Image: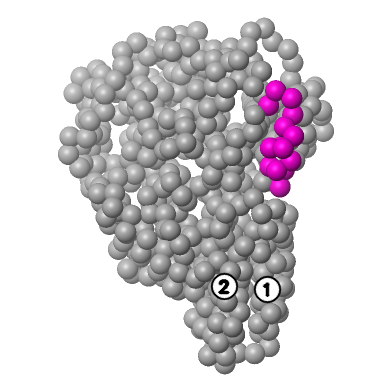
């Protein structure tokens, strides 16, 4: 489950957030001094942050997975393009035998480095089961995984306790789906647990050649790789957390591929740098205004409804996203099953209705706080909400704070601050299955990631049902209703999914991304 830093896991934010800094810029060195010439074809790409973990069973976010995709093998992978889909990778065939049994047959000849032998079904079994055995914080990605049965050296059956539809869109093609060498990991860790930042063996087209924290990561070709040859001899990923810094790095020819900010999109589209292409991609992220339902000032649903109807979403997006972001209808993005055509409350809201709800609550002279990060986008959202709520007589005080502080504000495990939390500007990232975003709002997440403290038995029932429902139309209806329940509670005002435009140097590469603009480096081709 991801949050706060693009592609960074909500679970890991506290552990690594303080160390991330500003990548190379924060290290106090020009980008040009952090990279150097190399023979062969080299791709230089911006990473949204430094890597935090290279063990796929314990990954801590998207940037980790972007690298893992290059150095390990999976049964399946996401296909590049404008629509979500998966294709075979290490598997020669994957077949759903019945709702709880998935048979796979591996391609022969995929080798682990370091003399650890061929990738076999035993390695698949070890890789998948260790996530559960060692109680990884990523184990929810595997849902009801029970075990993997071995049929022969290259064939096995994934056995689930109950049907689990997200296996196809999250477990197999993403983080926990990467396969590691049982022999190498057991020798390195003794118990088969987390090997952190020290991979004992590689099996993908690339190997990790060098890494300097917050400066660069270098991948070079794996000499033991016998599969399709990737487009580049070397990939250098430079962690640059700030998009404006990344844009300047691109213009200085220090990187060949980067995301760009939405407020720079119009400029780069009209006058792109030489030999460059700008592509617009939707994002899976979702931003919203939340309300702590347990706070005495917000217990009355009429107060919450008044706030919902007073918030004009297009005004917010014009100010905070330069008018380049579309209005969200919920937490499930376009292109993902369960995306609603429209929200229950119109984007513009209605001040007259808002005042009616406030009168019904019998509340006057109301003062509220709104918590947000001090990132300009979210502090701008808070300022606009402050102005909008003043139109119905609600005074709002803004509490902008750094990401480290904000990431704990709603957590019961981090003290008592959650009790004072009132309004929240929040933003989570997601994956291409509707179960992923809604999982943060079930009742057992109250005080963990469910900072609105939203509780609904029906919501929890639907969540469980959605994991096992295979019919797409029936599954979509489940997630429509779940988002309706969230909105009906009065605790949520959905804002936007933002966007993830990218820019790359056409004289150097033809980029390949997921539908949401996240790079798939193995599919990049050299110009």
- Local SS, label 1: helix
From the image, tell me which residue sits under label 2.
Answer: 349
Determine if residue 10 is in view.
no
Viewer-side residue, 273 vs 103 = 273
Q: Is residue 273 magenta?
A: yes
Asked if the residues shown at circle 2 and circle 1 are in contact, with their CB atoms under 8 angstroms apart, the answer is yes
How far apart, in angstroms, are the residues tagged by discs 2 and 1? 10 Å
Residue 388 is labelled as: 1
Circle 1 crowding by C-alpha within 10 Å: few under 14, some 14–19, many from 20? many
Residue 135 percent across, percent down from the top left:
40, 44
Which one is earlier in the sequence, the residue at label 2 or at label 1? 2
Q: Residue at x 46, y 19 (%)?
A: 204
Viewer-side residue, 127 vs 479 = 479
Quadrant of the image occupied by residue 342: bottom left
The outermost residue toward the bottom is: 362
The outermost residue toward the front is: 270
* Nearer to us: label 2 or label 1: 2
> In this picture, which residue range is highlighted in magenta?
263-276
Residue 56 percent across, percent down from the top left:
46, 33
Q: Residue at x 60, y 64 (%)?
A: 313
Please give left or right for residue 103 compared with residue 297 in the image: left
Q: How is the image coloured?
A: one colour
Q: Is residue 479 magenta?
A: no
Viewer-side residue, 199 vs 86 = 86
């Amino acid at each position: 489950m991801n949050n706060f830093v693009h592609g960074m896991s909500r679970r890991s934010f506290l552990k690594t957030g303080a160390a991330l800094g500003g990548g190379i810029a924060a290290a106090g060195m020009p980008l040009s001094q952090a990279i150097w010439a190399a023979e062969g074809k080299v791709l230089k790409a911006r990473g949204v942050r430094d890597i935090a973990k290279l063990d796929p069973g314990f990954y801590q976010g998207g940037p980790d997975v972007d690298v893992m995709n290059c150095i390990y093998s999976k049964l399946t992978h996401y296909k590049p393009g404008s629509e979500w889909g998966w294709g075979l990778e290490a598997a020669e065939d994957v077949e759903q035998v019945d709702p709880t049994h998935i048979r796979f047959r591996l391609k022969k000849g995929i080798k682990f480095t370091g003399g650890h032998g061929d990738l076999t079904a035993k390695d698949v079994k070890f890789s998948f089961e260790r996530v559960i055995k060692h109680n990884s914080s990523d184990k929810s990605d595997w849902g009801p995984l029970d075990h993997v049965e071995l049929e022969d050296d290259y064939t096995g059956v994934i056995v689930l306790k109950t049907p689990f539809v997200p296996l196809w869109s999250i477990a197999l093609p993403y983080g926990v789906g990467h396969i590691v060498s049982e022999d190498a990991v057991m020798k390195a860790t003794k118990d088969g647990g987390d090997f952190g930042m020290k991979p004992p063996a590689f099996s993908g087209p690339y190997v990790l050649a060098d890494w300097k924290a917050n400066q660069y990561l270098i991948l070079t070709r794996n000499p033991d790789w016998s599969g399709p040859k990737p487009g580049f001899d070397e990939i250098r990923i430079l962690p640059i957390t700030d998009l404006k810094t990344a844009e300047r790095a691109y213009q200085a020819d220090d990187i060949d591929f980067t995301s760009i900010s939405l407020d720079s999109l119009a400029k780069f589209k009209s006058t792109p740098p030489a030999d460059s292409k700008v592509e617009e991609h939707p994002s899976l992220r979702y931003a919203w205004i939340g309300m702590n339902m347990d706070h005495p000032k917000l217990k009355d649903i009429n107060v919450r409804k008044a706030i919902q109807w007073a918030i004009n979403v297009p005004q917010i997006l014009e100010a905070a996203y330069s008018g380049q972001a579309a209005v969200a209808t919920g937490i499930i993005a376009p292109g993902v099953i369960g995306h609603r055509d429209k929200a229950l409350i119109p984007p513009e809201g209605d001040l007259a209705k808002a005042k009616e709800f406030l009168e019904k609550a019998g509340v006057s002279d109301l003062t509220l706080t709104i918590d947000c990060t001090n990132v300009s986008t979210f502090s701008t959202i808070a300022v606009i909400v402050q102005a909008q709520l003043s139109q119905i007589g609600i005074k709002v005080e803004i509490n902008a704070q750094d990401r480290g502080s904000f990431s704990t504000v709603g957590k019961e495990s981090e003290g008592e601050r959650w009790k004072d939390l009132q309004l929240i500007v929040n933003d989570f990232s997601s994956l291409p299955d509707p179960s992923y975003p809604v999982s943060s709002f079930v009742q057992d997440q109250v005080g963990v990631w469910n900072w609105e403290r939203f509780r609904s038995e029906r919501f929890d029932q639907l969540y469980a049902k959605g994991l096992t429902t295979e019919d797409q139309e029936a599954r979509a209806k489940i997630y429509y209703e779940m988002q309706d329940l969230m909105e009906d509670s009065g605790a949520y005002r959905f804002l936007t999914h933002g966007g993830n435009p990218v820019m790359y140097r056409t004289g150097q590469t033809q980029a390949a991304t997921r539908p949401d603009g996240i790079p798939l480096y193995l599919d990049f081709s050299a110009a």
